[in-house]
Image (cartoon, coloured by chain):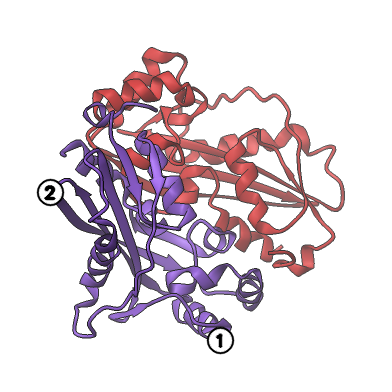
Chain colours: A red, B purple
Amino acid sequence: MDFIIPHLRTKTLVLASQSPRRQELVKALGLPVVVRTREVNEHYPSTLPVAEVATFLAELKAEPLLSDLGEDEILLTGDTTVVLDDQVLNKPADRAEAEWMLRQLSGRSHEVITGVCMVYRSERTVFSDRAEVRISALDERLIESYLDSGSPFDKAGAYGAQDDFGKLAIESVYGSFYTVMGFPIHLIYKAMKAL
Amino acid sequence: MDFIIPHLRTKTLVLASQSPRRQELVKALGLPVVVRTREVNEHYPSTLPVAEVATFLAELKAEPLLSDLGEDEILLTGDTTVVLDDQVLNKPADRAEAEWMLRQLSGRSHEVITGVCMVYRSERTVFSDRAEVRISALDERLIESYLDSGSPFDKAGAYGAQDDFGKLAIESVYGSFYTVMGFPIHLIYKAMKAL
């Protein structure tokens, strides 16, 4: 699927994300991709509305890369937040917190918001997409097994929609599955066509 | 994620499907899997309500395997139908039909129904799950590029939700993404726990 965005044929996508899910998703755009990340302290003001945390953090992740950005490079950053009862669930600090998060999510719906920041020359495009995810009433054995796998620890809300856990536990998504995975890739495609 | 269904620990899942998506999805159940397929003429009565085609075909696919099924084997078959305007879109016969289907799906919502048939000893469990998928207004270049990739031809409705095309074209899913991919794996997990 090359050249689906022909006017960007000579550009390179600079992805500032270590996430293998995001690295996989952007391949669909058909542009050459380089991964370039910088350490960022992912703090946000406690007064920030939860709905704005994802875009705030996506822009924060873009900051340290702006000065080095080439003329033919498009910078792309993203942040995914899991929101339950108007609280953001970040990456769990340890097993106990991961377990607590999974129990909180059990048998209910929560919201996933992914913020995106795209920078090309002087043009900056920032947007977010949200999806509602319903998790079934979780079985003890499934929780234990998932914690044992180690997979929850690098994920906001302690789970990945693409993990075996996600396959077994997600009852439904209302919105884009790929937004839940880490990038609303259909909207990034649209934004790139408009560049 | 082994032994999440402990009472089935000594069983083998017999998957009657050539679909790489289904083969991938059932791994989440943590049981040993063997793929065993037989040729089936996938015809259904023209008077059958569209909502029942998927379960009818799932049961049809199970038939030729029933006589050979071992005592410790659980047979699993599935069929995914794409429904638009109360019509089933099957696998496209050629490029022209695939193109026609993609243009039909463009800028609208359609329904995906996956039927499942599970057989264990004398117990047969049949069910289906449906999801609504919204496709954005498709760009000519995306359609051409996807047809060129050859991927539409073995897929009901001429697209795969997990393909690059699906990533760029699907605006939203209302229901289970995995049902759209080929198996409502969360419901299969539930049905297996109940065996």
What residue is shown at x 32% (from left), y 24% (from top)?
A: A143
Chain letter for mark 2: B
Q: As drawn, which residue projects farthest toward the left?
A: B122
Q: Which residue is mark 1?
A: B96
Q: Could you say whether the residue bearing mark 1 is in a helix, strand or loop?
A: helix
In the rendered image, residue B118, in percent from the top left (x then y), is placed at 23, 51
**Nearer to us: label 2 or label 1:** 2
Query: Which quarter shows the N terminus of chain B?
Result: top left
Occupied quadrant, residue A7? bottom right
**Mark 2 and mark 1: span between their CA atoms?**
44 Å
Answer few, some or many: residues within 10 Å of disc 2's Cα (few below 14, many 20 plus, some between 14 and 19): few
Q: Amino acid at mark 2?
A: Ser
Query: What residue is shown with label 2?
Result: B122
The image shows residue A134, relative to residue B184, as above or below, that is above
Q: Residue at x 65, y 50 (%)?
A: A26
Residue B144 lies in what quarter of the image?
bottom right
Measuring 34% from the left and 75% from the top, which residue is drawn there?
B41
Q: Quadrant of residue A185?
A: bottom right
Whole-percent x, y for residue A161 in the image: 43, 40
Q: Earlier in the sequence, mark 2 or mark 1?
A: 1
Tell me which residue sits at (17%, 52%) in the image. Answer: B125
